[in-house]
Image (cartoon, helix red, strand yellow):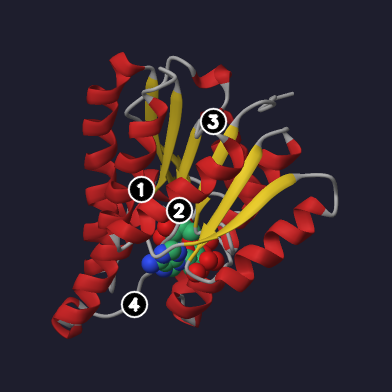
Amino acid sequence: MIDLKNKVALVTGGGSGIGKRIAEVYSQAGASVSIADINLSNALEATERINSKGGRTIACAVDVRKEESVAKMISHTLKNFDNIDILVNSAGNGVTKSFLKTSLEDWENILAVNLKGTFLAGQAAAREMVRNNWGRIINITSIAGLIGIPGRSAYAASKGGVIALTRVMSVELGTLGITVNAIAPGPVDTNLTSRMHTKETRQAYLSGSPLTRYGTLDELAAAALFLASKDSSYITGQTLSVDGGISSSGPLFAI
Ligand SMILES: NC(=O)c1ccc[n+]([C@@H]2O[C@H](COP(=O)([O-])OP(=O)(O)OC[C@H]3O[C@@H](n4cnc5c(N)ncnc54)[C@H](O)[C@@H]3O)[C@@H](O)[C@H]2O)c1
């Protein structure tokens, strides 16, 4: 069983969906967890649930698009827990809009949350991790960063950027004891997908997926637990697809 005792994890976007489940699973593995989200009441609710079962978590308000807000998230976490050993960048946003209809506002907001937010939180947390010469950074990207999915221009650009950033962070931070990997989820039911997935999207994912289903929060959290653990010590710079095989299949899959 994976043990995260004596580790401190910071999870952005931890108030909902994939980030929330990762925070719960990390806490069950013994970590202290700082749950950071732009939606503070969701983050507080997540901490209350976990702490009522004996976990040790705090809630943190953050807007990952803003440098000062990210700095406050880091200092609030350090004030409560002294260290940051593990960072999960799960805060994310997206829209489904054709390339021709994507506005500059959509583009800038999605790139700001998904890519700039990952940069800002990654840099600020890594500056703490180097003090202990140990760290794990896990960036939640998407299969949209790996394959061309219609309606996802801004989202895919941000997630492709996260994959590239993950590689560069890994080569620069490796000698400092920090591994940096990404997880590329396939479709999972969350608040985000309830906004982004139409009936047609759902049908296409089910018929285009070798495993013919959506993934679960637990399946995503299991990958994030492994990448946070000492068992993944020789893995860095990688993007692990947790997508039921969707990114491996081609147009002839359904034949
Ligand atoms: N659910 C899927 O099918 C799927 C697939 C691929 C990738 N992802 C990625 O997984 C991550 C988690 O998404 P989810 O599906 O759990 O969605 P979600 O909406 O349930 O969770 C996203 C969280 O990010 C928070 N957030 C949004 N903007 C923020 C900001 N500026 N600062 C801080 N927090 C902010 C939201 O409040 C929310 O709690 C995202 O990066 C998303 O792109 C999800």
Q: Nearer the viewer, residue 216 or 128?
A: 128
Dot 4 falls on a residue whose secondary structure is: loop
The local secondary structure at tag 2 comes to helix
- Residue at the location (57% across, 46% down)? 220
User: How far apart are labels 2 and 3 at the CA level?
Assistant: 20 Å
Residue type for callout 2: Met
152 with respect to 204 (left or right): left
Point out which mark residue 228 bears. 3
Q: Earlier in the sequence, mark 1 or mark 4?
A: 4
Residue position marked by numbered label 1 in the rendering: 121
Indicate which label's residue lies in the foreground, 4 or 3: 3
Residues under numbered marks 1 and 2 in contact, where contact means CB atoms less than 8 Å apart: yes
Give the Cα distance between marks 1 and 4.
Answer: 25 Å
Is label 4 within 8 A of ligand 1 (CB to nearest ligand atom)? no
Alpha carbons under labels 3 and 1: distance apart: 16 Å
Where is 11 relative to 230, above or below? below
